[in-house]
Image (cartoon, coloured by chain):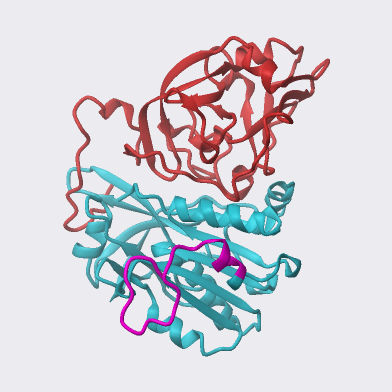
Amino acid sequence: MSFISRGFKGRRRQEGISGRVPPGQYVTEDFPVLSAGPTPQTPLSTWTFTINGEVDAPKSWTWEEFRALPNETITKDIHCVTKWSKLDTVWQGVSLDVLLSEVDFGVDYLTAYCDGGYTTNLPIEDVTDGKAWVVYGFDGQPLAPEHGGPARLLVPHLYFWKSAKWVRGLELTRDDTPGFWESLGYHDYGDPWREQRYQGD
Amino acid sequence: MEHLVEQALVAAPHKRLVWQLGKVVRVVPETSRTKTLVLEVPDWPQHQPGQHLDVRLTAEDGYQAQRSYSVGSPPEDKHVAITVERLEDGEVSPYLTDELDIGDELELRGPIGGYFTWQASQGGPLLLVAGGSGVVPLMAMIRHRAAAGREVPARLLYSSRTFEDIIYREELDQLAQDPGLEVFHTLTRSQPEGWAGHRRRIDSTLLEEVAWPSQQQPHIFICGPTRLVEAVATTLTELGHDPARVKTERFGPSGG
């Protein structure tokens, strides 16, 4: 690079975490909240999680059924496209491997859909083999509504807008169909290590 | 509730966002903690009021830091202005407010974000709710409304800690001489003697007083710290406003 910001020294990263923070990101201890609209209020009595779209038979769980599924505690670093990263976040939830094993399908993509109308698109190979979860716990507590509770997607190896809040289901699709932010100029895939923030990155 | 999807479908195709250099042509101290940087950006594509840009700083050894800042200027201006709040333990904002001077260059790219935006052609009424430096993207809408000469009824409800913390205060006073724009201030920490405005956090009563009834279907934009945004968005929904018309943006305590 050629341009130098006159007089900028900057803060160097702490020892030991340098390999964990993608380019252009800084580490925060807070848990910032980002969403495009009001926080939806869905009672657990009417909450369901559904897998539909290009599947032989759609599958749906009530909240009680979902909570009875095998779950795990996951510790991961997360990276938001607005530049913050948070290390060692602890989540509790159900692996997408568990959920997807309940349906028969032969397609390569999915669109996660949410209360409030938010959507995001993901390749299925990015949410299988222990790479993605539907989480309902954070730091040993139920996931707070402003952070996506009762349940959100967790796909920690991609920018955090892919970890859709208030997720209610997965629509399996033949083609990769841009979701909400992906249609508004953000990158289709969103790999923080390749700094895929916006279309064309 | 399907609004997010529909909004996404009408979005225009996107060109790759390239880094470019803007030159600081003016620095305007706004409050003791905020400054506006007016930038000359030769290849700036016209932005929509409400959008932001990314700033990238590079040290001599190649170390880089990036942050996002809302654009405060309207698309009608020939320059691009950002207003930066100095965060005490920040890495980027103290550089922008204390070090950067007229004639310096700043690497940036944008505009970014296509949801938290309003154009005069969309009409109104327009309800804007701001906390602290969350007023910046809303100011782009207010200035755009004035520049476009549209008679869209607009109201700004703006929460600041103290009188001295009000950003754009004099300009807002001037703009509010237009009977179509009403500005309501609330000061949450302390108020000067004789203060005639509100003096508490934005609550349901204040919103009922200031917001149009939900039947008038105002376009609503809320920007500020998370606690304010969550409370205001929830209350407006409870007052009957369609969540589809309530758009939010957060200025969290983290950052720099």
Horizontal side of B190 relative to B201 (left or right) equals left
Report the side of A177 relative to A91 (left or right).
right
Q: Residue A83 lies in what quarter of the image?
A: top left
Residue B223 vs residue A127, the one in the foreground: B223
Front in this rendered view, residue B164 or A94: B164
Q: Position of residue B72 (x, y in %)?
A: 44, 69
Is residue A79 visible to the viewer in this orientation of the structure? yes
Seen in the picture, residue B213 relative to A169 is either above or below; the reply is below
Image-based side of B201 in relation to B92, left or right: right
Residue at image position (67%, 73%) is B125
- Residue A188 is left or right of residue B223, and the answer is right
Compare residues B102 and B3 and report the one nearer the observer. B3
The letter of the cyan chain is B
Where B151 sits versus A102, above or below? below
Chain drawn red, letter? A
Q: Main secondary structure of the magenta part?
A: loop
Q: Which residues are magenta?
A: B187-208
What residue is rendered at 30% in x and 74% in y? B164
Q: Position of residue A151 (x, y in %)?
A: 59, 29
Residue B12 position by quadrant: bottom right
Residue B9, above or below B135: above
Magenta stretch encompasses residue B202: yes
